[in-house]
Amino acid sequence: MKMVLQYNGKRTYEEILASVKPVPLKVVGANVPNWRSANLLILGDNSRVMATLLKEFDFSGKVNLVYIDPPFATRNTYRIASRRGATISTGSDDEVAYSDALVGYEYLEFLRERLVLLRELMSSDASIYLHIDSKIGHYVKIIMDEIFGPDNFRNDITRIKCKPKNFPRLGYSNIKDIILFYSKGRRFVWHEPKVGFRDEDIERLYPKMTPDGRRYTTIPLHAPGETKNGSTGKPWRGLLPPKGRHWRCAPEMLDKLDAAGLIEWSSKGIPRRIVFADEAYRNGKRLQDVWDFKDPQYPLYPTEKNLEMLKTIIRTSSNEGALVLDCFAGSGTTLIAAQELGRRWIGIDNSHQAIATCLKRLTALKPNIFAQADFVYLEARDD
Ligand SMILES: C[S@@+](CC[C@H](N)C(=O)[O-])C[C@H]1O[C@@H](n2cnc3c(N)ncnc32)[C@H](O)[C@@H]1O
């Protein structure tokens, strides 16, 4: 049975698509003949801008990866303090970056409208990552299930966002937020992300050392299951495998391993297979669903996210040359990551402060984004 979230003012998928009106887009900077295939930074309300991309500029099904980090229904006002950097503050010399004012069902319907438009823009093998906190995130998960289908839910990633800290309320200190990862369909782009082992893990997992300094551990040469007739159930070097088990490989292979110095014999004459750390961790290990990517300590923009985290998402879930969209672009972390990884991108934000920060960061890139012929800055204008 399909599970849905009910709340006041909820429209159908089709009503949302029909009701959002496109808005004229005016090219302001770096004009190029065919701006539709350029990297686009757009100032405007993301809903109407996406309606324009969808209904007037044929972007339907063209976006290969979406990352969004929308407001989290916190009731906070986020400011850029002229002296102290980005903050949540109220000082008179601070400039508002954005207000996170919508809460409850109004917030959910605001986000749902954007998710419907995003889904229409996504290609059949595209993925979407939605960054959210654990106060509102569980409601958002149900909405994502409704729009993308529970079968396309891939992960609920726990993101460690900061160091342990004092927490003013009773309860466990909150040091994480969550990232909901969905694909549009069953087949989606996936490049297995690998991470290195930490030194302490290597020391724990490979506690032994050869005389020439190679770390290793040993594992049993036998596995569960008795083999009555095969060679792996027969004695090797006069030893039978323990009761209920068989040798992992045939006696000739065991001889070869021993000759290669890959079997360690205990003082009691028990053989075990040697596994070297440098061979096991050469290719790294699979990235799990708990991520430690702390945000910048001195951000240029409030709620600025970790650049390496965005690079991990983009490397994993898109091919080179793919089109990446972030319609809550903020300081442009997604755009910078996409640019540096050779992907095309579209960034949308309705905050002048956000767009100014994006432009500042993009200009600091080498080569400077304005020196490239494939960047266009647009503004949504109703006039
Ligand atoms: C949490 S911040 C994104 C931060 C970003 N991930 C970064 O690394 O800097 C959310 C952004 O969404 C923008 N935003 C909120 N409502 C919007 C709307 N309707 N259209 C476009 N942008 C919107 C805000 O201006 C804000 O910059």
Image: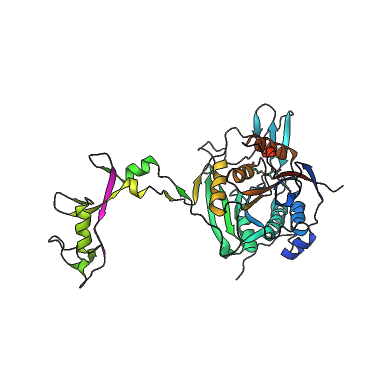
Ligand 1 picture quarter: top right
Q: Position of residue 381 (x, y in %)?
A: 82, 47
Q: Which residues are magenta?
A: 210-227
Judged from this view, the residue extending furthest toward the left is: 238
Is 188 or 202 nearer to us in this picture? 188
Q: Is residue 12 visible?
A: no
Q: Position of residue 274 (x, y in %)?
A: 25, 51
Quarter of the image where the N terminus is located: bottom right
Q: Position of residue 235 (x, y in %)?
A: 15, 64
Say whether residue 365 is left or right of residue 31: left
224 within the magenta span: yes
Q: Position of residue 133 (x, y in %)?
A: 60, 48
Residue 2 drawn above or below residue 372? below
Residue at horizontal 33%, vertical 44%? 204
Residue at horizontal 64%, vertical 47%? 69
* Colour approach in the figure: rainbow
Is 21 or 237 nearer to us in this picture? 237
Residue 212 lies in what quarter of the image?
Answer: top left
Judged from this view, the residue extending furthest toward the top is: 83
Judged from this view, the residue extending furthest toward the right is: 383
Q: Is residue 304 visible?
A: yes
268 within the magenta span: no
Say whether residue 60 is left or right of residue 175: right
Residue 259 drawn above or below residue 96? below
Say whether residue 348 is left or right of residue 342: right
How many marks overall?
Answer: 0
